[in-house]
Every structure is written in C-alpha cells, then in structure tokens.
Amino acid sequence: MSSPGRRDVIRVDLSAGTVVRERVPDDWRRDFLGGKGLGARYLYDELDAGIDPLGPDNRLAFFVGPLSGYLPAESRYAAVTKSPLTGAFLDSYSGGSFADALAVALPDAFGLLVQGAADEPVRLTVADGEAALRPADDLWGADAAAVDDALDGAVACIGPAGENEVAYATIASDGGDHHAGRGGAGAVMGAKRLKAVVVHGDSPEPTPELAELRQRYDDAYRDDDTGRWQAAGETVESVDFANEVGVLSTRGWQAGTFDDAADIGVEAVREASTGRENESDAVPGGFRVEAADGESESVPRGGALMSLGAGLGVDDFDDVARLGATCDLLGMDAISAGNAVAWAMRAADADAVDFEVADLAFGDADAAEALLTAIAARSTTLGDTLADGVDAARERYGAGTVPTVKSMELPAYDPRGAAGMALAYATSDRGGCHRRARPVEREAFARDEWTTADRVATVVGAQNVRSTLWSLVVDDFAGETMWEDLGAEWLSAVGLDYDRDSLATLGERVWTLVRLFNVREGFARADDSLPELFEDPLPDGPAAGRTVDREAFDAMLDAYYAARGWSPDGRPTAETVDRLGLTAVVDDQTPLGAAAARTDSDSDHTP
C-alpha cells in the first residue's frame, strides 16, 4: 500500500435499511482532512438547526483520518454527532481494537455515516471494505462485556445506558475497556436502535517509509516528558497532581483537596495493578486489575478516578474501581455519572430534596453504585431525572450546585485554582471539557505570573492544534510529538502537501466551523460562562481563597473572542469566515458577527 488513499464514506440509512458508498468531495478532504474536521463538515451540511439529537435526522459518524492505522501509539476513531446532553456539536474519541480494525477494514474510506433509525435492534458488520446490517434482538439488554463476548470481531457497542438513551451514554469497545465517552454518542446510537458495530480487520502493512517514520516518532515519544509521564503513571497520576496544586474537586465541588487522595492515586493503582494494556508499546496504556470474577479489567482513567473517588468522597481504591467498572459495563460516561451522583449526595446532605433513597451520602460506594445502576436503567424517579444530566435534575428539583457548562458536567479540575481552565471550560465547543485545552498543567505552578494574554494564547493555541490533530485522529498524548509541524511530515509521506501554517489554519477552520454549527443551534456568549459556584472562594489547599472573578473572566472572554476574530457576542465575523475559506460553506440560517475584532498581534496562538 503506497498510501492510505481514503476518499469515500459508507452511508448507512437505518430507516431504509440501506448501505451505500459515497465519494467525499475533494475540497472537503483537503480543507478538513478527516476525523473531527470531516465530521463537522458533514454535520453542518446535513443537519437542520434544531433537529432532535435523538431523532432519526441526526447523524452519527464513526470516522478515522487519512493516516489511521499508521500513526504512532494507539489508533483512535472519532464519534461525531449532535449531543443529546448539550444540543451542541459533539466529537468523542476512543482507542482499542475497534479503532485499529476500522482503519483496516475500510482502507479507502473515512468510515461510517449513520442516519435514520431502525424499527428493531440491529448491528452493523464491516469487513473487506463493505458493510451490512444484521438483526441484534438477541443482544438488546446486554452490557458491554456480554456484547463483546457474543460477537466475533472488533466491537463498538452500547450498554443498557445507551439503550435507555441516558444523555451521557458512551460507545464502548473491548468489553468496556475503551469508550467514546463524553456527551452522549451512545444515546444517539440507542435511539437509532443500533446495538453494535462489528469490524473485521488486521493491522495494516505500512510502507518502509511509514514504518521508519512511526519508529522514529515512537522513540521520540518514549523520551518526551509526556511519554515518560504516561509510561510511569498514565492519567491516574492526575489525581495526585490535582490534589497537590489544590484543584481536585472533592465531595461535589465543596473542596479543592482530598485528604485520602493517596489511597486512590497512582501509588494505590500501581500496588493493585496486574499489568498494563500494552506492555511493550511506546504508550503502555491503562493499568489493569483483577476483577471480581477473576478476570482482568481496566482501572478507571484519571478523570473517572477523580469524579468517582474524590468527587464522591470514596477513599477505597477497590470501591472506586468497582464504580468505574459499573459505568464501563453499563456504558456511561464516568465524569458525568459521578457528577450526577455527587449532585444527589449534596442535595441529600442539605435536606433540600427527599429522594427516598437510603444512605445517599458522600463516601458510601454501595449507595453510589445503586444510583448509577438506577440511572442507566431509568428505573427510579431520581435515576430517570439524573439520566438527563445535572441541569435536568436542578430544573426538576430546584436544588443542587454541581457545575456544568453548556449542560455538560465538568471534569474534576477546579477552575478557581487556575483561571485559564475557566476560559477553557467556558469556550469548549462540546461543553465543559478539559481535553480541548489544559492550561492548568502549567498555570497551577505560576498562577500569579500568568496574564490574560498568556491564558488566551494557551487556550486558543491548544484548541486549534487539537482540532488539527483530531482531524488526523492521532493519539491524544503521543500526538504531542507532532505539535512542531502538526503532522506535515506524515502527510507528506503519503503524498499530501501541507505545511505547518496550512495545518494551523486548518485547525482554526475546523474550530470555527464547529462554532458556526453551535451558533446556528442558538448558542451565544451567555453559554460561554461558568456557574456562580466558582465565585465562592475555594476553602482549602494551596489555592484556598481563590475565585473566578466575574469581571476578570468577562475581560478574558473579550480577549479570547478578539483573538479568534469573533464579535463581542461570540459569533465568527464575515471577515474571519472569509479568511478561513468558509464563505461558501456558511448557510443563511447562521448569524455572523457584526465586526472583526482580530488584530495582527493575535494572529498566531499556537504554542
């Protein structure tokens, strides 16, 4: 194979029961690459504003990039759709065997674009460049591990949470070890009655040039600071880091440190671990521990450990692992689910609501597990309400202070201890998310030295870079070895002519197109905000006394919009749209900003 040569998508219409192959327009491939970018282009082109995310008109893409299967570290795929949790654009990523197999089984296609809804449960089988629909009635009701065991091939599936359209249901692979997690792509899959996608394919055979390139980047990653960090502790070390700098949200965001963090942090995980997912790889992968049935299971990643451990006041590692496994098997995002349980525990603590749930208190892992199960099944009034997210619970019960942005529950980095995270959360295109930009990693050690300009440059730059790399669909951490040229060397190896500047512009183009999608859905400056909770000072730890100052935050948001060439109300301007080559893309239903705010000094925000 001289080049991946991806040119097509496989369009699956579940209402009609049809599968057809279509050519992707050449300019779409050039301007958006694949993954996030191509998914954004399809969603913006094919979805009318205001469509129901759980209705048949929504699209669900399983997309890879032009170099998937060859890039360093673990292969990944992008699940792209309109989120049932936020009503905004959603891209969610997962690794594991399914991503590997999808890249190989469709060597000339970017992936699957699913629309419509089946009358009865179905599964989609992909092999040798073709796809076919099969009944899946016998799998409906099964959890992620049972589905994986029942099917031959690499599987992406939903568990009971997806079937019941929990707004933060995931798409699970490898029996629940990997998830396209945040924002509810699994609920979209459930609403379409698509239980699973099964792919048959082996690892691709790279050209000598690609093999040499991969080896060089793998070696570079082993020596990179991020590579050494991940090899030593994977993302579970985030628990220890967040606690050390005082931004570890604890007991439903009531504190910034957790006295028992060491009991659920990296040393506790190492002690309990039976090994790593990929022992010999440049990126060893997550830790594994012995499960209750004697089998091996994945340890929850850092965000899940934080939300299900410190966030719920659970200080026993085995209990936290059990809660993580519950979310994995049921197919629920552990960050949103942990926050939902924390919301209920805070409301119960304050006697604000009588939930008629016994022992619903911080530190009680059994009560947390029971509520997680009720959420996935929508089996109780409280579980049914929390299945629609914290905002839905707050509206129904009139109580609770667990924070959200654009209705997405926040990860456990408290922005009061790092103002750049306040900007990152508020401007994230899919809702409260730390993956678009993580300034906390640097700002937490130099809080008083960072200026508004530092925070804006860091957030804008990271958002643009990751939009490029997620259009290539590169591993999130190993991809940091590609920040210097944004993948230009890799693309050149398969005959695609990009330089760093053109790829930086591509990332900004993708981010702006997603913003246009969200603006068309009615999102505006008021949605780029943080809850009042963060105006209260942190009570403890190294960041004690710090708040998110409303006036300072508004000034920072103004500077962010100016750097992006958006109007003060958060809309891309005609000037910016034209500069990014989006003029012919924008439809009449998308309101643009009135005037450009960009200056020459704001032109390069790539770290």
Image (cartoon, grey):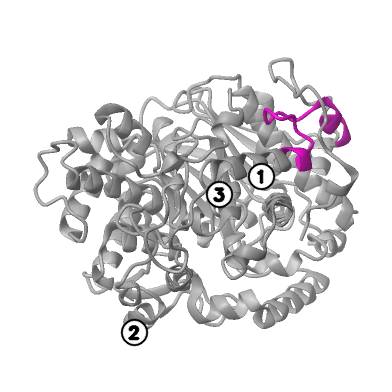
Q: For the residues marked 2 and 1, what is the alpha-carbon distance in whole angstroms?
A: 43 Å
Residue located beneath label 2 in the image:
271
Query: On the picture, is 379 further left or further right than 68?
Result: left
Residue interval drawn in magenta: 561-579
In-front residue for pair 472/402: 402
Q: Quadrant of residue 462?
A: bottom right
Q: Quadrant of residue 206?
A: bottom right
The amino acid type found where label 1 is placed reads Met
Rendered view: 581 above or below 410: above
**Is there CB contact under 8 Å for labels 3 and 1?**
yes
Query: On the picture, is 182 further left or further right than 269?
Result: right
Q: Is residue 576 magenta?
A: yes
Q: Secondary structure at mark 1?
A: helix
In-front residue for pair 240/245: 245
Pair 2/1: label in front: 1
Q: Sort mark 2 into few (<14), some (14-19) or many (20+) by Cα contacts within 10 Å.
A: few
Residue located beneath label 1 in the image:
556
Rendered view: 585 above or below 214: above
Q: For the residues marked 3 and 1, what is the alpha-carbon distance in whole angstroms?
A: 10 Å
Q: Pinpoint residue 24: horizontal percent, then vertical percent.
A: 75, 36
Q: Is residue 201 visible?
A: no
Residue located beneath label 3 in the image:
422
Q: Secondary structure at mark 3?
A: helix
Query: On the picture, is 399 further left or further right than 108?
Result: left
The amino acid type found where label 2 is placed reads Glu
Q: Which of the labelled discs sits on residue 349, or is there none? A: none
Question: Which mark sits nearer the N-terminus, 3 or 2?
Answer: 2
